[in-house]
């Protein structure tokens, strides 16, 4: 039975067998990333096994040392005692040195393997994430995705580097310790093993609860990360509305939810560990009591008793470690499940070859810029009940300048999203140069277009890097030329570091007009066939707007251009104006033609703006 959780993802109520298979698939996801390092992994495993076996030798040698010491009684003679004690002690020191070396190699090798494997996993996860369609991001929050790339992968890294090696080591210590105990005293072994069945049963019961708790805790932690992400991205609004206290309270409530789940998990793990400690150490007490009785009756030697006690401590320590290791593994399974969800998502195009094209693929000729919408209807996946675009049809000739005008929420930006194929229409088709848009390789198609958004989004690098983002690999001369065309060169050279000036997070070191001119320079550098201007001059002062408009006029020459504008003064010179209302194309024509329509929407909007200015 399916159900949707609080994040919109679908959980499945599966029978036990299927959950086991799912856990196995998630484990195989991790093991696949170890394959490139299998040689080093084999060496590290051998070193780990050697270190564990040498550890198992110490109780045996300690018992031999006690027996050798017992040989010094008057009835047994002293002639070989100093030599025997020294020999055993030297042998123990030699084995300790070998164990230290193998432990060092195993530890460093597993760290190298784990960090490299998780780095590969991080690259693949980020590569898959960044190539997912816009519909995916429309249904996810940034903080949640960031949590998967940080907290979840950190949990997986800790499992590969620390938990899995310890799991193998403690398994060897447990199995080897039990086998060696059995050779010492069968009676005492049966007493000690009596604690194992209840521990296994309890581990299975607690494991199910801890796995569910771990996933819920990861989800709650992702929610807190989301709040931090949103708050820091919108810190301007937070401070402008004096909502610091509100955000602190919102974060506090989210953290309280996480703590509630985390503390419940801590109680589960604490109860599990407490039971194991009680069962195992209670068993040790019984074993010591029984062993003391056997020693008193002369049925075992002091060396055998020493050997048995030490091996019992090894076994008890291994069993005690399994409780915490099992808890950590459950956390890693939950984290792997969340990461695997991303890896199973279908990307828009293949990343290894730029543009999703294979090296021998036939690259289409550059677009001429002919665009046609034919009965296009569209609903956002997150709002399937709301039809945003309702059967729009229009055709644009190559090089034509088209303005999209209409009230807010009428569908103008959605048309641009469809043009860029951020989404595909549910019905109808978009034609480009006589071919349906889906027939073109997606990344290649987007490379034929360039957009200057209303809010220029800059990255936290240098001015040079932000302009070069329009065409990575462009020469310094091409970047400078693009900046000059956008009239950005004038203010760039005034900075002490020039083009190497850091713009700050999201470009906060620059004014709105400066950010906009850099975005225009980035679009100019791309040299697109289709240009999209989304209120491209809205952030500029009058003088900057005049200069940039000159650059845009040159850029628009011989290019198909779509302009979204609320200020109608910027679209008067468009070849054609498309008026959109409630997802419908209600008017089409030039500024002069539409201004003459007595009851037209465009004329109404124009009168509102121009009369307001007067």
Image: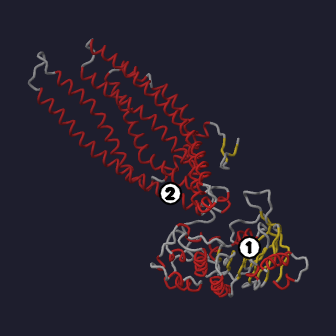
In the rendered image, which residue does mark 1 sit on? 436
Above/below status of 177 relative to 96:
above
Of the numbered discs 2 and 1, the one sitting upstream in the chain is 2
Q: In the rendered view, tell whether residue 604 sits above or below residue 224.
A: below
Quarter-of-image position of residue 614: bottom right
Position in image of residue 109 (x %, y %) = 36, 51
Q: Is residue 30 left or right of residue 528?
A: left
Number of marks drawn: 2
- Furthest toward the top, the residue is 297
Q: Quadrant of residue 83?
A: top left
Label 2: few (<14), some (14–19) or many (≥20) C-alpha neighbours in 10 Å: some
- Assign a secondary structure to mark 1: strand
Q: Residue furthest right?
A: 598
Counting from the top left corner in percent of width and height, residue 396 is at 77, 80
Q: Is residue 464 in view from this perspective?
A: yes
Picture disc at residue 519: none
Q: Closest to the observer: 498 or 223?
A: 498
Residue found at x 31% / y 45% = 103
Task: Give x and y (percent) for residue 153.
Answer: 50, 52
Q: 568 or 383, which is in the foreground?
A: 568
Give the Cα distance between marks 2 and 1: 36 Å
**In the image, which is nearer the foreground, mark 2 or mark 1?**
2
Quadrant including the N terminus: top right
* Residue named by callout 2: 122
Q: Residue at x 41, y 48 (%)?
A: 161
Q: Is residue 301 above or below residue 386?
A: above
Q: Residue at x 37, y 20 (%)?
A: 285
The quadrant holding residue 130 is: bottom right
Q: Against 411, is 88 above or below?
A: above
């Amino acid at each position: 039975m399916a159900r949707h959780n609080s994040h919109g993802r679908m959980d499945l109520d599966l029978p036990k067998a299927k959950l086991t298979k799912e856990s196995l698939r998630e484990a195989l996801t991790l093991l696949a990333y170890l394959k490139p390092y299998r040689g080093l992994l084999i060496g590290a495993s051998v070193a780990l096994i050697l270190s564990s076996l040498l550890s198992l030798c110490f109780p045996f040698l300690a018992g031999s040392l006690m027996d050798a010491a017992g040989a010094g009684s008057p009835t047994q003679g002293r002639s070989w005692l100093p030599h025997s004690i020294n020999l055993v002690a030297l042998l123990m020191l030699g084995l300790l040195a070998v164990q230290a070396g193998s432990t060092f190699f195993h530890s460093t090798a597993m760290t190298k393997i784990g960090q490299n494997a998780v780095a590969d996993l991080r690259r693949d996860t980020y590569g898959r994430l960044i190539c997912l369609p816009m519909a995916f991001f429309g249904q996810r929050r940034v903080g949640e995705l960031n949590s998967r790339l940080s907290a979840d992968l950190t949990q997986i890294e800790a499992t590969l580097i620390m938990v899995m090696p310890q799991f193998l080591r403690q398994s060897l210590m447990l199995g080897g310790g039990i086998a060696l105990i059995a050779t010492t005293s069968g009676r005492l072994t049966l007493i000690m093993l009596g604690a194992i069945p209840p521990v296994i049963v309890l581990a299975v019961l607690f494991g199910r609860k801890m796995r569910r708790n771990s996933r819920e805790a990861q989800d709650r932690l992702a929610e807190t990360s989301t709040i931090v992400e949103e708050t820091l991205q919108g810190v301007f609004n937070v401070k402008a509305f004096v909502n610091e206290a509100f955000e602190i309270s919102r974060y506090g409530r989210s953290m309280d939810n996480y703590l509630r789940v985390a503390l419940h998990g801590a109680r589960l793990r604490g109860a599990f560990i407490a039971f194991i400690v009680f069962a195992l150490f209670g068993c040790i007490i019984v074993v010591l009591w029984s062993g003391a009785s056997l020693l008193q009756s002369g049925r075992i030697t002091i060396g055998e008793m020493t050997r048995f006690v030490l091996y019992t401590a090894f076994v008890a320590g291994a069993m005690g470690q399994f409780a915490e290791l099992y808890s950590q593994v459950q956390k890693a399974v939950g984290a792997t499940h969340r990461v695997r969800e991303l890896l199973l998502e279908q990307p828009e195009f293949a990343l290894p070859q730029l543009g999703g094209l294979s090296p021998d693929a036939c690259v289409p000729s550059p677009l001429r810029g002919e665009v046609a919408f034919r009965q296009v209807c569209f609903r956002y996946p997150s709002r399937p009940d709301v039809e945003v675009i309702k059967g729009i049809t229009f055709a644009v000739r190559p090089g034509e300048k088209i303005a999209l005008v209409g009230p807010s929420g009428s569908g103008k930006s959605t048309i641009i999203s469809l043009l860029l194929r951020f989404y595909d229409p549910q019905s109808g088709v978009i034609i480009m140069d006589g071919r349906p848009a889906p027939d073109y390789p997606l990344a290649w198609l987007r490379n034929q277009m360039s957009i200057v958004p209303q809010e220029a989004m800059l990255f936290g690098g240098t001015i040079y890097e932000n302009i070069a983002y329009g065409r990575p690999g462009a020469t310094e001369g091409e970047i400078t030329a693009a900046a000059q065309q956008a009239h950005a060169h004038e203010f760039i050279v005034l900075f002490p570091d020039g083009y190497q000036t850091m713009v700050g997070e999201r470009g906060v070191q620059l004014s709105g007009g400066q950010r906009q001119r850099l975005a225009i320079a980035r679009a100019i550098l791309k040299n697109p066939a289709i240009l999209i201007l989304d209120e491209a001059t809205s952030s500029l002062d009058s003088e900057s707007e005049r200069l940039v408009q000159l650059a845009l006029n040159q850029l628009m020459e011989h290019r198909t251009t779509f302009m979204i504008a609320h200020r109608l003064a910027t679209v008067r010179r468009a070849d054609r104006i498309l008026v959109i209302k409630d997802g419908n194309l209600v008017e089409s024509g030039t500024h002069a033609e539409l201004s003459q329509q007595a009851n037209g929407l465009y004329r109404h909007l124009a009168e509102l703006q121009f009369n307001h200015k007067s």
